[in-house]
Image (cartoon, rainbow, N blue to C red):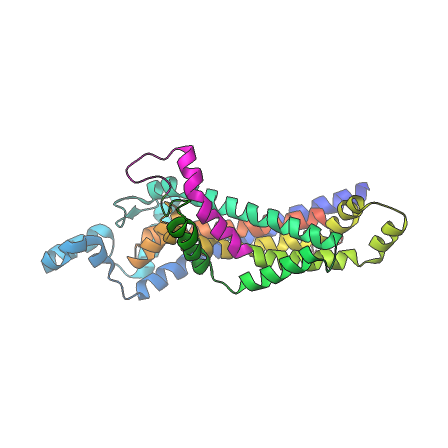
């Protein structure tokens, strides 16, 4: 027993060291690619920064503005300047929001994290319930119904789910607000945020549920068909004991791996959902930064996204090591 615990601990340490050694290189490559792609965009960042006054400025004024905004250097030099400033604690200035990027992130990141966490939590809860129903009555009405609904929903894009929920619950029925986190012109209260978040959270969760349900259902059914489960049932163990003691430990590992693999999709979904519902999150701000070629904001948001994906995959792999004793890390 002690030997297995020691081996598992060594695997976790080895995994953490490997991911920590690779993560900086991945983040650097992602930010470099972000600046390169932004520079190739047809959007003129100077025109976006000056807004309506761009046409009324002279060539000298435009040159001075470009120098002030750091737009008069090649993209690779802009990337290096931004990177060195970031190392010193300065993430740059967002000309789209007219404030430091750090302030934009501090104001908007909690809204995105809350929305994404709530959507993923609901998706996982629905997935577990559907999987347990499939394990209790394989091929039953609930099992077949949830599988058919998951297959049908998987073909519907997130923006269609978001717009459809607005059309039904906001426009037709008038039950829930259409957009924002609070009524216009008012400070958001906890009740306001709760009411305004219902549709965005459900739309984000609905985009993830089909894939999670189908994968977990398959894992549960495969675990339920093993010899160990058949022997447990033959010994007279109850359904709850069989599910929690024999089926769940085997089925958790695929669900954990898939949930981590869906993190990038959740980020993309939050971009769509926040845009449709005018949610005051960082994802919607990232869209604005991309449309206006706001290098500093776009690069910072990209770094946060890359770090989130790396951290999520590391956490998922660590949980998989803990949940499934058969998984090992190669030396």
Residue at (28% x, 61% y) in the render: 74
Q: Which quadrant would the N terminus be assigned to in this image?
A: top right
Image-quadrant location for residue 140: bottom right
Percent coordinates x, y for residue 39 in the rendering:
31, 63
Say whether residue 127 is magenta.
no
The magenta stretch is 181-208
Residue at (38% x, 41% y) in the render: 181
Q: Which quadrant would the C terminus be assigned to in this image?
A: bottom right
| Direction from residue 88 to residue 9 in the image, left or right | right
Image-quadrant location for residue 143: bottom right
Count how many numbered circles sit on residues in the image: 0
Percent coordinates x, y for residue 66 in the rendering:
20, 55
Residue at (25% x, 53% y) in the render: 70
Asked if residue 317 can be seen in this view, the reply is no
Percent coordinates x, y for residue 282 in the rendering:
39, 47
Outermost residue, front direction?
173
Camera-side residue: 90 or 280? 280
Percent coordinates x, y for residue 308 in the rendering:
50, 49
- Magenta stretch secondary structure, dominant: helix
| Direction from residue 308 to residue 3 in the image, left or right | right
Residue at (64% x, 53% y) in the render: 255
Say whether residue 184 is magenta.
yes
Asked if residue 285 can be seen in this view, the reply is yes
């Amino acid at each position: 027993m002690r030997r297995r615990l020691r081996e598992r601990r060594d695997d976790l340490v080895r995994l953490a060291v490997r991911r920590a050694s690779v993560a900086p290189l991945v983040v650097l490559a992602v930010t470099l690619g972000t600046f390169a792609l932004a520079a190739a965009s047809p959007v003129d960042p100077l025109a976006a920064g000056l807004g309506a006054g761009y046409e009324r400025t002279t060539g000298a004024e435009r040159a001075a503005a470009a120098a002030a905004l750091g737009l008069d250097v090649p993209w690779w030099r802009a990337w290096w300047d931004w990177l060195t400033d970031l190392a010193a604690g300065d993430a740059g200035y967002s000309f789209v929001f007219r404030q430091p990027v750090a302030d934009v992130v501090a104001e908007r990141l909690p809204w995105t994290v809350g929305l994404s966490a709530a959507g993923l939590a609901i998706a996982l809860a629905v997935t577990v319930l559907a999987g347990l129903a499939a394990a209790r009555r394989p091929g039953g009405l609930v099992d077949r119904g949830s599988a058919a609904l998951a297959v049908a929903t998987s073909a519907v894009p997130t923006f269609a789910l978001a717009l459809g929920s607005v059309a039904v619950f906001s426009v037709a029925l008038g039950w829930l607000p259409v957009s924002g986190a609070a009524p216009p012109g008012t400070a958001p209260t906890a009740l306001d945020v709760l009411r305004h978040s219902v549709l965005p959270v459900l739309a984000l969760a609905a985009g993830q549920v089909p894939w999670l349900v189908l994968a977990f259902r398959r894992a549960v059914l495969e675990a339920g068909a093993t010899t160990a489960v058949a022997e447990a049932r033959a010994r007279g163990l109850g359904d709850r004991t069989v599910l929690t003691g024999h089926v769940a430990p085997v089925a958790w590992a695929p669900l954990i791996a898939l949930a981590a693999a869906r993190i990038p999709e959740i980020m993309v979904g939050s971009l769509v959902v926040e845009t449709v519902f005018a949610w005051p999150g960082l994802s919607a701000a990232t869209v604005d930064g991309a449309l206006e070629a706001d290098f500093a904001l776009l690069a910072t948001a990209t770094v946060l996204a890359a770090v989130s994906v790396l951290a999520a995959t590391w956490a998922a792999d660590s949980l998989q090591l803990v949940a499934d004793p058969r998984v090992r890390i190669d030396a």
